[in-house]
Image (spheres, grey):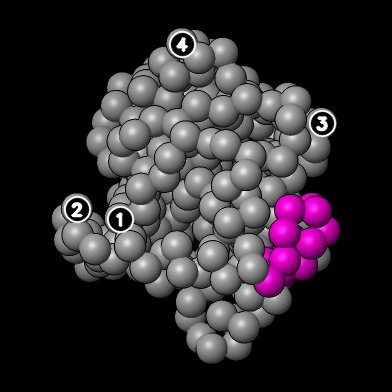
Amino acid sequence: MTISIITATYNAEKTLETAIQSVINQTYPHIEYIIIDGGSTDNTLQIIEKYKPFISHLISEKDNGIYDALNKGIDLAKGDIVGVLHADDIFYDDYSIETIAKAFHKNDVDAVYGDLEYVQSTDVSKIVRYWQSKPFKKHLLKFGWMPPHPTLYVKNEVFKKIGAFNLQYKISADYDFILRLFSNTKYSFAYLPIVITKMRLGGASNKSINNIILKSKEDLNALRSNKVGGMISLFFKNISKLPQFIKR
């Protein structure tokens, strides 16, 4: 089983090297690593060049944002399983991908996900927020539940059937994809009650009030277009984040 890992980059010189090293250090041997760069003007490409032997595919060209870049990576991916490691994220440990692969073998499912730690941008050992997920049940979607997208690994064939990220969404394309996937009764899922990924604080959705408003509008649109819920679901989705700030 080959696992394709996609990293989308744009002027990511501050964090990209640790992301790449996190992939290289994985104990699982069957990894296809794909980097899609948006035409960086800093030292991002020089950093990528250092690790070229470990990179299966590299594209560097202007794109229409992170979801456009990820879609390019998904189109390139030849692995049985596809997941994402953002340029400012790292895996929790060197066994993360091996653990995911074992979960696919053991459970015979279409997707696997786990827990996520939000960490300080300058010190990844300092946990700011802990996103503990849970085993999936369909009714959870109506209450705004979703797995942490950076921990979600999906069979490549699923993308071929339901599509990748809808570029009409600027911020919530991952939520729309998750609703599309998890509301489809054809597919099965396994939850790993362990941290898979560490995510540095500073994501696009929370950078400004305008982004927060846009994200709320897009989340609501995704809920309605996937016939999952509406304003009540969005309300529960937002308040469900509060316990994540309580230390483990």
Image position, residue 11 (x, y; %): 48, 67
Residue denoted by label 4? 106
Position of 155 with respect to 122 (left or right) is right
Q: Is residue 116 visible?
A: yes
- CA gap, disc 4 to disc 2? 28 Å
Q: Are marks 3 and 1 in contact (CB under 8 Å)?
A: no
* 96 is higher (above) or lower (below) than 133: above
Q: Are marks 2 and 1 in contact (CB under 8 Å)?
A: yes
Residue denoted by label 3? 161
Question: Mark 2 belongs to which amino acid?
Answer: Arg
- CA gap, disc 2 to disc 1? 7 Å
Residue drawn at x 57%, y 37% as measured from the top left: 137
Question: Mark 3 belongs to which amino acid?
Answer: Lys
The image shows a total of numbered marks equal to 4
Numbered label attached to residue 130: 1
Of the image marks 3 and 1, the number of the one nearer the N terminus: 1
Where disc 2 sits, the SS reads loop
Q: Are marks 4 and 3 in contact (CB under 8 Å)?
A: no
Residue drawn at x 63%, y 39% as measured from the top left: 138
Q: Residues within 10 Å of mark 4 (few under 14, many from 20)?
A: few
Query: Which label sits in the foreground, 3 or 1?
Result: 1
